[in-house]
Image (cartoon, rainbow, N blue to C red):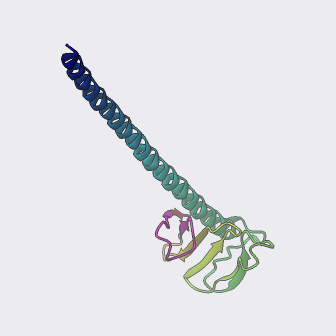
Amino acid sequence: MNNQQSTTNNQQRGFTLFLSLVIAGTLLLVATSITSLAVKQSSISVAGRDSQIAFYAADTGLECALYWGVRNPSGFTAFDESTSTTIDCNRDANNPGNQWQVGGGSVSSFNITFLPEPYCAEVTVTKQGDGTTLIESSGYNTCDLANPRRVQRAVRGVY
């Protein structure tokens, strides 16, 4: 009788070990899935933020060119094909280089930096033969060309 009881206890112990391994494996699988999902969501969130920053940089470049092309203090466009003009946007102690010579030709280009943040924008203003002006502004979440996470967004305006 003692022998039979011992065999039953050993079988139950084996089943308990198996059950605990199944439960531990299931919990590990669930934890891994949740962690993987969280990492993917974080990546998507960062990409969305970088895209928004790049868009705002591009929009700021467009607004700067539009201001100097239409509403500048002199009353004349700074992008006149016959004369050149000095313009500035976002020029302060952090950004002393945000001043450019534009005009004097049909195409003018300038780059705006948004230091101390790493954002920037490249702006091209083209005076077209039909009297319209085309502004193309590309914004970047970082000015580092080698950065693999660099995001570009562009806006275009015509007046």
Q: Which residues are magenta?
A: 136-154
Residue 37, horizontal then vertical, whole percent:
41, 44
Q: Residue at x 29, y 26 (%)?
A: 13
Q: In the figure, residue 79 lies in which quadrant?
A: bottom right
Q: Residue at x 50, y 49 (%)?
A: 45
Residue 77, horizontal then vertical, whole percent:
67, 73
Indicate yes or no whether the magenta region holds residue 114.
no
Indicate yes or no whether the magenta region holds residue 137.
yes
Q: Nearer the viewer, residue 32 or 99?
A: 32
Residue 119, horizontal then vertical, whole percent:
61, 67
Q: In the figure, residue 109 lies in which quadrant?
A: bottom right
Q: Nearer the viewer, residue 62 or 29?
A: 29
Query: In this rendering, is residue 58 above or below 12?
Result: below
Q: Nearer the viewer, residue 86 or 99?
A: 99
- Please give left or right for residue 32 compared with residue 98 in the image: left
Question: Furthest residue to the front?
Answer: 2
Question: Furthest residue to the top?
Answer: 1
